[in-house]
Image (cartoon, coloured by chain):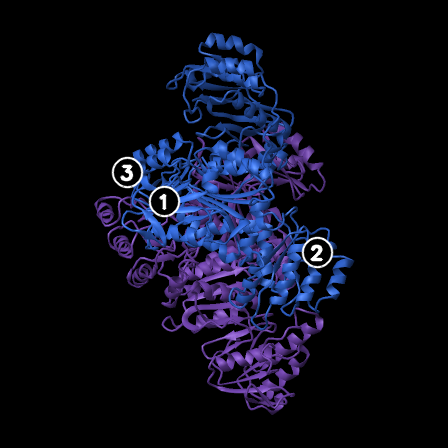
Chain colours: A blue, B purple
Amino acid sequence: MVNEELLKPKSIVVIGASNDIKKPGGNMLKNILSGGYKGKMSVVNPKEEKIQGIKSYASVVEIPETELAILAIAAKYCPATIKTLAEEKNTKAFIIISAGFGEGDEQGKLWEQEITETVNSVDGCLIGPNCIGVITESYKGVFTAPIPPFNPKGCDLISGSGATAVFIMEAGMALGVSFANVFSTGNAAQTTVEDILEYMDIHFNPETDSLVKLLYLETISNPKKLLKHASSLIKKGAKIAAIKAGSTAEGSRAATSHTGAIASSDMTVRALFHKAGIVYCSSREQLLSVAAIFNYKKLKGKNIAIITHAGGSAVMLADQLSKGGLKVPEISGPDAEKLKSFLYPGSSIANPIDFLATGTAEQLGIIIDYCEHKFENIDAMIVVFGSAGLFNVENVYNVLSVKLEICNKPIFPVLPSVVNAQREIQSFLKKGHIHFPDEVVLGKALAQVYNTSEPQPHKTSLPKIDIEKIRSVIDAASEGYLLPNQTVELLDAAGIPRVHEIVENSKEKLLKALGTMDFPVVMKVVGPLHKSDAQGVVLNIANKNEAAETFDILMKIDSATAVMVQPQIVGLELFVGVIKEPGFNHTILCGLGGIFIEVLNDVSARLSPISKNEAEKMVHSLRGYKLIQGARGKKGANEKIFIDIIQRLSALVEAAPEITEMDINPLIGTQRAITGVDARVRIG
Amino acid sequence: MVNEELLKPKSIVVIGASNDIKKPGGNMLKNILSGGYKGKMSVVNPKEEKIQGIKSYASVVEIPETELAILAIAAKYCPATIKTLAEEKNTKAFIIISAGFGEGDEQGKLWEQEITETVNSVDGCLIGPNCIGVITESYKGVFTAPIPPFNPKGCDLISGSGATAVFIMEAGMALGVSFANVFSTGNAAQTTVEDILEYMDIHFNPETDSLVKLLYLETISNPKKLLKHASSLIKKGAKIAAIKAGSTAEGSRAATSHTGAIASSDMTVRALFHKAGIVYCSSREQLLSVAAIFNYKKLKGKNIAIITHAGGSAVMLADQLSKGGLKVPEISGPDAEKLKSFLYPGSSIANPIDFLATGTAEQLGIIIDYCEHKFENIDAMIVVFGSAGLFNVENVYNVLSVKLEICNKPIFPVLPSVVNAQREIQSFLKKGHIHFPDEVVLGKALAQVYNTSEPQPHKTSLPKIDIEKIRSVIDAASEGYLLPNQTVELLDAAGIPRVHEIVENSKEKLLKALGTMDFPVVMKVVGPLHKSDAQGVVLNIANKNEAAETFDILMKIDSATAVMVQPQIVGLELFVGVIKEPGFNHTILCGLGGIFIEVLNDVSARLSPISKNEAEKMVHSLRGYKLIQGARGKKGANEKIFIDIIQRLSALVEAAPEITEMDINPLIGTQRAITGVDARVRIG
């Protein structure tokens, strides 16, 4: 697990160092030396006397005690070397950049295990194997380029893939994104992305630490740890964006062959990110756009002013913001007219504020001042300013640079002239700013950030349910689907309203029991899993005679064991459900029933426990939400009760974590009540 | 309209030329001179003797006859100057870069009109005003930078916005995208984007002309011209991608203030692009990614091999391709095993083909050879190859460069190391290639290209309908909604099956007429527009007595004029409709009825005339299509009949273009029949 020896080692040994800086061991040493590492440095290489000016030891046995060891030797030599370091050299941190371990064959897996056990036995930290290394303020322990200038307030980058970390740094540097600590976890034999995040959380100092964390994940080995520390960090003021690659079947297969990643469903990963407040990204470009946005002031409202000298970009950007749920509100009134008087004739101030190709730096400054101080319906500004190549735009970017610092409202600079204004953009970036080359790419990322909720509170108040009763049902149950009577007991204990029903396997008893029920009724076969497919559901049964006939028909269906009778309730079909994926909290699902699930896949998913606020958002995010509100002359369903049921379901699985799968489908909703009609519960 | 004088002028005059190259007139002249223009050049500027080494005329009256005039003088001087040029100097082509015309005030609009009339009177061509100019092989007539090296096989760019054209060229050049002719139409007083496309179509020579056309549009002033010439060009072998900005209400407002663009609905624009085979883009980045894809060989199937030394990029790319409907099929079998034997241990060939960080140029060559020649289930390759900074990757890119030329299957190169391999990427681009810096951005654009259909055939065979009858109804109709009996006649003449119904305003007649109809029936009020809202639809009427009661209730509704009775048909609710937007062919809509339209907006739209193939695709593209096929134990609707009805609707509006709005909602579909139950037709 991450320790001080990894982050600020007083001494480092590179084992397998080389004079050939095209070799990983050579380049690693070169990077540490030229990176200004101030501690004690030693190297091991039996073939050389000196490596890059440093005395080379022939064997690890000969080196002095060393806090951090970086191994660039063949996999097969690593276990013994690590053992010597751990047991004889008091080494507490290990980075293995070599490949040929768990990602390869069985032998490699065994070596990886052996090494992990050795490192664990001395409470040490192991990064890798099969990684590019680590960059901290203290040392530049990677064998790759580039090594971005260390900016303690830049982005921390934690990546499950070394090459991806490299490509992210390269693309980021071109935009002006700066970096602080970089960790490549490789096979993550011991230390995972989550572990590093945990360390960052526990030791978080908002004054000195980076506030932006970027993650690239192919597997989430400990979802609860990720959730806990990501939300904790965000609550303390950090911002996190992450790519979880392998979200599709094909991507997941690719991830498995790459790092042996274990697939989690994209739905559950998104639910976790949502709960934690992590911005979900799907590409390096998006991750970096979000990182750039994180580096600017926080967007606190959805109303954006677009300020530009180039109308086309403004039109495309307005389209994109609107698609993402942000607004480009009209600006009007006396202040708008005053602003117009400072601009050239033909300028438009209605928003976009287009101050024409001839617009000047002074005008830009005035426009920003108006947006900052006068236009109260504006929450943020996007300035699109390029160059047609006629004159230098450095003065414009200087104004922008100052406004970026002093304005309270966030300003996002789109500088599209990557050729004409190349020099001016570079000088803008050197002042520590970040730019967005494409307005639409920014617009998308901005909506992604704005639409990501704050982390959910750790303690959620859930409805009170009869936990004792629930435990007694669950403890008595065996694995597999619960019996109908057990299911009913669970629903009642959880306070989830359900239809009252009769289950009988004798016609006489059934007809007798029917005495208490209003017609029409529905009759369903008990036994077969898919009742509808087996024609095992009969509606509109009007009287006892019809019920008797139907009983005979249903009992003839294959694997029929009994018949269930329920009053026939009319209303809007709804659905709630639960899925449990390994390592994650239960995923709670809700939606409209019927075609909305089966044809349209219109389902909202969040991780339990679900707060009232979250349950509300789940319901509101459904594409078919209008039907719950009531549409097309039909009354909808009682939203408050639906939200309560979602929370009760969450309370139920918190009390009975053994539930691995559950659905109540349909629930029939009216304005007065929502009633569960059919439920299945599976115990894992 | 575009003419030879605009494209290859034998003589050019720049009016308002200057020695100050920071002024548009100065920079325009500089660009033409340094761009190697070989014709006769003259300039007008009363204040100077010589401009940039060329004798300057004091007035346009003094210049010799000149084919092309470029005006960089204040708007107010333009009308008279153009008149002199047109009437006395035999000038046939005019580019006005000055602003202050139609985009400004009323006076500007009048000047624009006057100029257009003058130019039209000599059959001349006018580009602008308020534009950056024109680049052709003959001359570089823009006042802006950059001026990309002219590549006759590069992209032709036609843009409604000058700055956007500049930004597109800048971003494109950085990727290696090259350009041929560039046109900025500005206010398009005379010549529009469509006009230029028309000229390109009529004079198209696949041997010498650019095959890639990029369009940036804020308005489509002549949709039919765009459709005609875009599809014609594509059929001749060209490829077209376009941005139509202003697709949302906010973007549309932005476009109006920018170039006075007239809004068309995004749905109809997409339908036009679909019909023409134009790839729909929403950003400069996407347009350029598509342009880059166009420059490579054509993707003929959906099966992609991802070849990489960096697993993470491959995982993200596989996710994106899969989301876009493309495939990353598994590669296996004896050939795959043979390929594996050439790679380092630990390499994966299952697809992605990951040949590890240590993978070599030779290995890349072998992998590509296998994909090209041995793996028949592979249609294209994406090669992701960056650099960790250890060694030069030029040899890898050289192999790639050769394979790009010789392979029949398309290869798309993702070169993510924009820092580490900057030099090697530049050298790769100098060989005439284009690279993609981000794998996911490529993946999205590739799906966009693959999912764009070929242009629809110009002649569509539509079902035979009774045109004579239709014309007699339409010719007799007045503007507004047709009467129920007229609507019925139209449907019958078009062969669109409908429910048989009785409309009566007397109870006695109604009850008499009911003699021929099976119960249960539906009764609907006639008169109010929104029957459902007015409680004007009553279902399940079981006998004549109930019918009589219901008649009385319905006739009490406000604006009730009669009552309609129909047999009550049970089945799947469907919908077809028509919208007519100015200048476009009729947009034909289809969908499932009810909530699918009103809540989910699940509607498919294409421009009339609709071929059978198109109608099929419309139906298949519905999110709720599974319901038509039959889902959840319910039988669906007869797809063939639905397709036929869509085509008949198309045939109807072709015969009756006066129809501006129409819907048949619902149509009730079963496996045997589809029957229109309610229809509205509006004549414009």
The label nearer to you, 2 versus 1, is: 1
Label 3, residues with CA under 10 Å away: few <14, some 14-19, many ≥20: few
Q: Amino acid at mark 1?
A: Ile
Name the residue carrying label 2.
A371
Side (left or right) of A349 relative to B64: right
Determine the image quadrant of residue B666: top right
Q: Mark 2 and mark 1: span between their CA atoms?
A: 51 Å
- Name the chain under label 3: A
Mark 2 crowd level (few <14, some 14–19, many ≥20, 10 Å Cα): many
Instruction: For marks 3 and 2, give the one nearer the viewer.
Output: 3
Image quadrant containing the C terminus of chain A: top left
Percent x, y of residue A21 = 35, 55
Q: Is residue B614 left or right of residue B111?
A: left
**Any part of residue A132 in sight:** no
The chain holding disc 2 is: A
Residue type beneath disc 3 = Asp
Q: Amino acid at mark 2?
A: Cys
> For the residues marked 1 and 3, what is the alpha-carbon distance in whole angstroms?
17 Å
Toward the viewer: B55 or A312? B55
Q: Which residue is mark 1?
A: A97
Q: Position of residue A586 (x, y in %)?
A: 50, 28
Quadrant location of the N terminus of chain A? top left
Above or below, B507 relative to B377: above
Which residue is disc 3 drawn over? A105
Pinpoint residue A613: horizontal percent, then vertical percent. 62, 33
